[in-house]
Image (tube, rainbow, N blue to C red):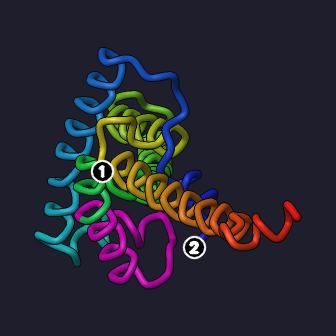
Amino acid sequence: MNTSILSLVFKPNVKPSIASQTAWAIFRVVVGLMMIHNGLDKLGNIESFAEAYVSYIGLPFPIFFSYVAAFTELIGAPLVAIGLFTRPAALGLFSTMLVAMYHHILVAGFSIPYLELSAIYAACFLFFLVNGAGLFSTDALILNWLDSQAFNEKAKQLMLLEKSYQVSPNKKEKQMR
């Protein structure tokens, strides 16, 4: 796989400082951990959730989409918390929160108490979708490992190239005559 594509997935978008990266990591862990219970709640009574939320907004296959939402939250939220595949996980969670916001608007209009939590979560996951996990994350460790592997491969290629241009002592003597 091309390392430039992987760089787009794993590389953060800010200039690092210890304070900002520490805050970023704490933010990521808190948001990820707080989101897990939403998936557990859905699985607790999937039929009720499907009827009250998914059918209400008119999506087909409400049980299927209820499971999709629950497992997006149960898998994506811990991934965000540990900073692994953060952008793809954040995309799934952001999409789920947009659907939740749409449901709240259908039920209560633009009522802040109904929209508040899903809008805050949506904004958080949009942040991670755009910016990645930060430097204190599993994504950053993977990117550093991939970069070192690519560097090692380039160094090997350079050494082989250099070795192929080295002239043996016997050939040097012949060239000097």
Residue 115 placement (x, y as % from top left): 40, 36
Specify the quadrant that holds the C terminus: bottom right
Write down the region rendered in magenta. 53-74
User: What kind of element bears circle 1?
Assistant: helix
Q: Nearer the viewer, mark 1 or mark 2?
A: 2
Q: Does the magenta stretch mainly form a helix, a strand or a loop?
A: helix
Would residue 162 appear left or right of 108 to someone viewing this image? Answer: right
Where is 42 relative to 95, above or below? below
Residue under the point 31% across and 72% down: 51
14 and 26: which is toward the camera: 14
Where is 22 relative to 149, above or below? above
User: What kind of element bears circle 2?
Assistant: loop
Residue farthest to the front, as pictured: 177
Quarter-wise, where is residue 53 in the image?
bottom left
Name the residue carrying label 1.
138
Specify the amino acid type for callout 2: Met
Q: Mark 2: few, some, or many residues within 10 Å (few <14, many ≥20)?
A: few
Check residue 1 in the rendering and tell me which mark sits there, or answer none. Answer: 2
Residue 66 placement (x, y as % from top left): 33, 73
Specify the amino acid type for callout 1: Thr
Residue under the point 22% across and 61% down: 39
90 and 171: which is toward the camera: 171
Residue under the point 73% across and 65% down: 165
Would residue 146 appear left or right of 165 to someone viewing this image? Answer: left
Count the numbered circles shown.
2
Residue 16 placement (x, y as % from top left): 43, 23
Residue under the point 33% across and 55% down: 84
